[in-house]
Amino acid sequence: MSGKPRDHHRGVVLRTERLTPHMIRVVVGGDDMRDFATSGLTDHYVKLVFPHEGVDYPEPFSVQNVRASMPRELWPRLRSYTVRAWDPDAAELTIDFVHHGDKGLAGPWAAGAVPGDELLMLGPGGGYVPDAAAGWHLLVGDESALPAILASVEALPAGALAYVLVEVEGPDEEQKIETAADARVTWLHRAGRPVGEALVEAVCGLEFPEGDVHAFVHGEAGFVRRLRHHLRIERRVPLERLSISGYWRSGVDDEAWRAVKKEWNRQIEAEEAAELG
């Protein structure tokens, strides 16, 4: 695309795969992906761009230009997704989508994607990679965090101790995990319970091994907040040893969550500061 901003990437769907009843893998590539680059992190993410149908956007297209020149109701919708894998030699990017029927925006798109479809994205961003020097690792999340958790476990060195707790709806949503690490994997089945309830119970009941922990905890904001309090206040895990964030929030869409997330985090930090003294 002529004049394309450096952080915009237009991928062409190469193939798709239904991994589980509710997880769809989409692999994109094409010449425009050749300048996509990651930096060795395992939680890289992209923001997928979904323009409104029937709207004429200025060319060359960029989210920044659209926001500067068009009313908010016409701005493209953005959805954040973790990079499952990036193959720089083949210039192929793999993204796994949680799909629940017609609900949402990106999931239905992935369900209908066919080779040749285009996907515009921003990024990549990210900030976490397992610390090889850590005494042990704790990786916790729901389906939305599963791609990053899998990428992280695969990146662990041989013999590294990792406790991996993943909550999915049922046994047919489990995925195979391949790693050289000493990974103690627990699949928790939601079976209709509130998202994250089983994860909170499992982490709070976990007997922590000796040594410095490096933790990754992501998923629905409600349970993430409860686990952040447990890890920071009750377990005294230093903030610098904890990658933790609400990827999404039950009951609101991505735009609404992004609008309040910064203030939500600020309130949590203030509460922690008061409790930690």
Image (tube, rainbow, N blue to C red):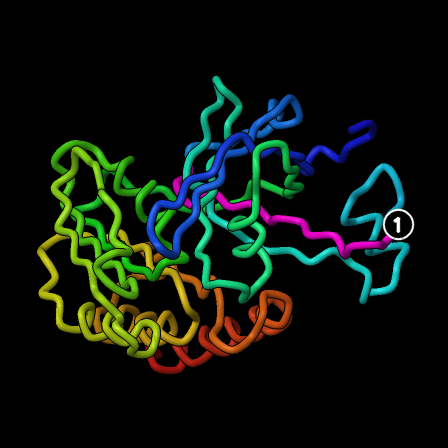
Position above or below: 94 against 234:
above
The residue pinned by badge 1 equals 56
Q: Look at label 1 and name its amino acid.
A: Asp
Q: Residues within 10 Å of mark 1 (few under 14, many from 20)?
A: few
Image quarter where the N terminus lies is top right
The picture quadrant where one finds residue 263 is bottom right
Question: Which residue occupies 55% across, 29% down?
Answer: 37
Q: Main secondary structure of the magenta part?
A: loop
Residue 272 in the image: state x and y as whole percent.
39, 76
Residue 228 in the image: state x and y as whole percent.
34, 70
Position above or below: 180 against 149:
above
Residue 31 in the image: state x and y as whole percent.
64, 21
Magenta stretch: includes residue 80: no
Question: Which residue occupies 21% across, 54% down?
Answer: 164
Query: Disc 1 on helix, strand or loop?
Result: loop
Magenta stretch: includes residue 48: yes
Of 188 and 88, the residue lying toward us: 188
The picture quadrant where one finds residue 203 is bottom left
The magenta region covers 41-55
